[in-house]
Amino acid sequence: MIWNPTKECMNAEDKRRLQGERLRKAVDRVYHGVPFYRNKLQERDLRPDSISSIDDITKLPFTTKQDLRDNYPYGLFAVPMSEIIRLHASSGTTGNPTVVGYTRRDLAIWSEMIARCLSAYGADRNDIFSVAYGYGLFTGGLGLHYGVEHLGATVIPMSSGNTAKHIQLIRDFGATALACTPSYALYLAETMAKTGWPRDDFKLRIGIFGAEPWTENMRKEIEAKMGVNAYNIYGLSEIMGPGVSHECECKCGSHIIDDHFYAEVIDPETLEPLPYGEVGELVLTTLTKEGLPMIRYRTKDLCSLNPEPCECGRTSIRMSRIMGRSDDMLIIRGVNVFPSQIESVILELEEFEPHYMIYVDRQNNLDMMEVHVEVRDGFYSDEIKVMMELKKKLAARLHSVLGINADIKLVEPYTLERSEGKSKRVIDRRVLK
């Protein structure tokens, strides 16, 4: 189902013309409205009339999360505060929070974008959505909330937490769609199974998962345990929030809503653009955002881009699943390791639950990695020999994928901490001496 065929099925030539027009307006907006950007552009001897097409985007400077923190709280806003009708912000656990502001038009565009996403998942006005992303300053809850209402469907604003009550209401209210992080979906599925209620008591058919990287194997795990079709949604508050890209029924990449956002992939070291199909850091430019326009924002997310039209009929450029983050990448004894690689291996093996923790330490100036993994019911044993065989199996598979050895610690089912929001999978204890 195409929510906005005029934009979602636009041919490449018309799309690039539209993107070029909108980029010129965006550069004009930041040049005249944001001193930070005006200074950056003048340093490069650039003015708004320097942009004649979307190809000129490479002339423009990059923006980073640190730039938002340095201009905290409102320094990058392009409109007066009298035009800002909502604020969101990151947690600010590593410094000043990144503050984002929305005009009335921004919120209208955002709601329409989310409606496009939901439509691509097969949802319509007859669906009932349980939104279990966090509400408040986090963009997930309210982003999905207003998109569901724009679609004309029913929203249950559950937020995260109070899992037992949440499961009861999913059943009693007849929820047909669930929106939350994939790690929380697994926790919900696990708790639902413990209730003893039959699967037929639940009407869930669509799962909308994002806010953290997840693998294809985790998708299969969620679908098997919850009986839903699981779809990815991608976004970040600095750009808009959830809905920057979305999967469709084909599940072959996430469609970037590229009439509102222009995507590039760059080499995170050289900062040079990479060709389609190559993995690099995703860079996004907002083409229509009024409150907080972002020019070539470095997301730190690693993916590739595919410009080919999709079988679903949409012509928007597609991004691959996020393969990790350039700033979260672990370097273990000179080898690049992403938590998503470890997760993928764990989920390939039926003996293990999709719950794990990675601990990185340094002993005698040598990096060490320890992976704690839950063993499934039915496979956990008091016999040392059985557990040693499981440990060797997982260690060998990880070594074949990562190229380095990892110490494995197998734990009983339900012993690792569950997450009701974004999951924390890595604890890096290394201290350089």
Image (tube, grey):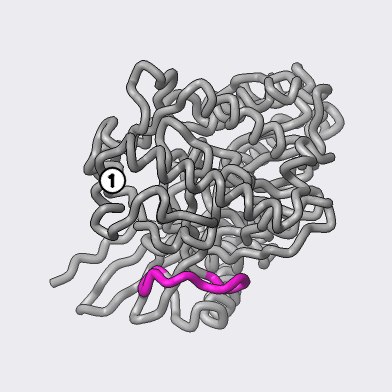
The structure residue drawn at horizontal position 56% and vertical position 51%, both measured from the top left corner, is 20
Image height of 17 relative to 117, above or below: below
Residue placed most toward the observer, 123 or 110: 110
Magenta range is 268-279
Quarter of the image holding residue 74?
A: top left
Q: Quadrant of the C terminus?
A: bottom left
Total labels drawn: 1
* Residue 339 left/right relative to 254: left
Q: Residue 263's x, y, as percent?
A: 54, 56
In this view, which residue lies farthest toward the front?
49
Tell me if residue 275 is in the magenta stretch.
Answer: yes
Quarter of the image holding residue 144?
A: top right
Main secondary-structure element of the magenta-colored stretch: loop
Tell me if residue 262 is in the magenta stretch.
Answer: no
* Residue 179 left/right relative to 67: right
Q: Residue 56's x, y, as percent?
A: 47, 61
* Residue 183 left/right relative to 364: right
Disc 1 residue type?
Answer: Arg
Residue placed most toward the observer, 377 or 400: 400
Residue placed most toward the observer, 338 or 315: 315
SS at circle 1: helix
Q: Residue 317's x, y, as percent?
A: 66, 57
Q: In which quarter of the image is the N terminus?
A: top right
Image height of 163 relative to 398, above or below: above
The structure residue drawn at horizontal position 67% and vertical position 52%, both measured from the top left corner, is 15
Residue topped by disc 1: 38
Q: Residue 120's x, y, as percent?
A: 77, 41
Regarding residue 70, the answer to whether it shows in the image is: yes
